Amino acid sequence: MGTWSAGHALYRCKLEQILTGAQLFSYATAELASQVTLERCLRLASVSRERSCHVTVLRRGQPCRREVFLSASGCIVTDAVLELVTVWGCSVHVSSIDSIDEIPLNELSDVVERDLAPRRIDAFFSPSDGRALNAHFDGHDSLILQLSDAKEWMLWPAYTDYNGPDKVPRQFERLTREYIEKTPPSAAFSLLKGGALLLRRGVVHSVKGSQLGSAHISLWL
């Protein structure tokens, strides 16, 4: 594990260094960590009327069949999701948690929007050594806030000047896989609780949970 220079077009720092002071830092690591938990997000997402709030369970980078954790009426069965996480090592992605009124993101959004204007906020939960997605790059800049425990990151410089939709076309999956097979990562490090990472569009990354598991949120910029 190590550090890297700004020449990688990717910057690692604490929240008080990237945003506007320690108030947000303490809020993100304390208040958010207590509110943005897997069980709570599953419960709130199951009753949310917002179509943008969506739960995906992933194992080894691939989504699980939704009927495995949905009831006959289409509701999320929390115990089934937790079993997939604890027994099968699955990760959980909850999209657009900013659309859930009961999760207190207003203060965070107000502070961040002064400079960064996030368009969406997603939450990721991973067990020990869990990996939600295979190595990939995003079609947008992201601000990563680590809420609990730690995640292990590996990074590769962008190999394309992609400037398309946020959802990167599937054709890039093969190209990315071939790229990382022949290119060593430019950085490998642990992002600890309370840490922040500004991830530029196009930077290839691979992420897995620490030995204790972890939770982080991703702000789409």
Image: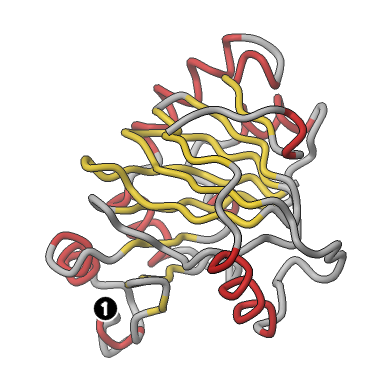
Q: At numbered mark 1, what does the secondary structure look like: helix, strand or loop?
A: loop
Q: Position of residue 56 (x, y in %)?
A: 42, 71
Tell me the quarter of the picture where residue 71 sits: bottom left
- Residue 129 lies, with reference to residue 55, above or below; the image says above
Q: Is residue 135 left or right of residue 142?
A: left
Give the amino acid at mark 1. Phe
Q: 3 or 166, which lies in front?
A: 3
Q: At 22% across and 40% down in the image, what residue appears?
A: 212
Query: Which residue corresponds to mark 1?
Result: 69
Q: Is residue 171 left or right of residue 89?
A: right
- Residue 108 lies, with reference to residue 85, above or below; the image says above
Q: 44 or 131, which lies in front?
A: 131
Q: Position of residue 10 (x, y in %)?
A: 70, 37
Tell me the quarter of the picture where residue 61 sits: bottom left
How many badges with numbers are in the image?
1
Q: At 30% across and 58% down in the image, what residue appears?
A: 130
Q: Is residue 2 left or right of residue 107?
A: left
Q: Is residue 190 left or right of residue 70?
A: right
Please say which color scheme the image uses.
secondary structure
Q: 49 or 174, which lies in front?
A: 174
Q: At 50% across and 48% down in the image, what residue appears?
A: 154
> In what quadrant of the picture does the N terminus appear?
top left
Q: 66 or 98, which lies in front?
A: 66
- Residue 9 lies, with reference to residue 15, above or below; the image says below
Q: At 55% across and 40% down in the image, what residue appears?
A: 187
Q: Position of residue 92 (x, y in %)?
A: 37, 62
Q: Residues within 10 Å of mark 1 (few under 14, many from 20)?
A: many
> Residue lying farthest top?
22
Q: Position of residue 21 (x, y in %)?
A: 65, 10
Tell me the quarter of the picture where residue 12 sits: top right
